[in-house]
Image: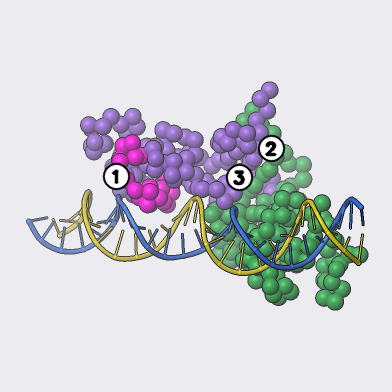
Chain colours: A purple, B green, C yellow, D blue
Amino acid sequence: MVSKTPDIPAEIEIPDEISGLRMTRQRQEVYRTLMQQRNHPTANDVFMRVKDRLPHISLATVYNCLEALVQHGIIRQVNFERESSRYCPNLSEHGHFHDATTGVIHDVDFKPGVNLADVLNLPPGAVIDDVEITLRGKLASA
Amino acid sequence: MVSKTPDIPAEIEIPDEISGLRMTRQRQEVYRTLMQQRNHPTANDVFMRVKDRLPHISLATVYNCLEALVQHGIIRQVNFERESSRYCPNLSEHGHFHDATTGVIHDVDFKPGVNLADVLNLPPGAVIDDVEITLRGKLASA
DNA sequence: ATCAATATCAAGAACTATTCCAATTATAAT
DNA sequence: ATTATAATTGGAATAGTTCTTGATATTGAT
């Protein structure tokens, strides 16, 4: 069985379990939202969207679900300055470009074969577990 | 005149004005603290340190001073995840390496001649105003 | 030097994003 | 079916930061 709710058409099929995390109805819907609306929503954005399908869900549950998904490496949490955290299902190592004029956040991939140590003077012996690259700027409309 | 308080020995001399910002006594002490203790303190860290010299200063004023200094490009505000903001007087374009074991934050400089566009697939027409690079990991004690 | 205009400071209240808590409900294991 | 475990809920609590207001200091013009 893939979905527990065949009555509601599920545009994206989500299995009962992902990397050891039980996919409850709430987690499914949170995850589905992220997969469908890939514009880096905040927890509150997700909350409002998920309510269409689960009117009784609470914001605390959305936070719980997002945390569980992040913890299990299913989604990523992205922070800009001290703004609300945003969430994205793009698991590939990537950075973010924040367009100051539109507010839109674009995923930015690394060029193939790039090594951080080639670019940065890392402290000797540094073992990098996680990289976070955020760019802020404008998109020349030319 | 460089300092208004010759009675208090000032290890670091701070001018009356920096890039158009009037350097009041409070701003001087906040700035001096950052120059002396370069371990990326939080607003509260700065508050506690500055109190030695200005016992009547308030946390709100420290926030105001930090904001004014950031706004005028005299110091930088650095954010890790959703933790308290940290502040540093290192104005050169640099990233941060967060040592997970000690909690120490190291400045990380770019290797000379590195261009972001060589490393990242930027959206076409992107003009970058600000870059933020945060690394998390461990320092191999070898 | 005096005065008005402006900027800064202080203290606490207010705000926002997030987390915690206790009670309920759902799921899984026996 | 019963019990144990985990998830959900709603509201209260928290932390960091910002806002507000009145007081204080500084500047520039006279």
Of pointers 1 and 3, the one earlier in the residue sequence: 1
Which span of residues is magenta-colored?
Answer: A50-75
* Element class at badge 2: strand
Separation of residues labelled 1 and 3 (CA atoms)? 36 Å
Residue picked out by circle 2: B128
- Between the C-alphas of marks 3 and 2, the distance is 12 Å
Left or right of C29 on screen, residue B75:
right
Q: Which residue position is annotated with label 1?
A: A56
Question: Do marks 1 and 3 share a subunit?
Answer: yes
Mark 3, secondary structure of its residue:
strand
Same-subunit check for callouts 3 and 2: no
Residue sitting at the far top: A142
* Amino acid type, residue under disc 1 in the picture: His
Dot 1: chain letter: A
Distance in Å between CA atoms under marks 1 and 2:
42 Å
Q: In which quarter of the image is the C terminus of chain B?
A: bottom right
Q: Mark 3 lies on which chain?
A: A
Amino acid bearing label 2: Ile
Residue at disc 1, secondary structure: loop
* Within-10-Å neighbours for mark 2: few <14, some 14–19, many 20+: some
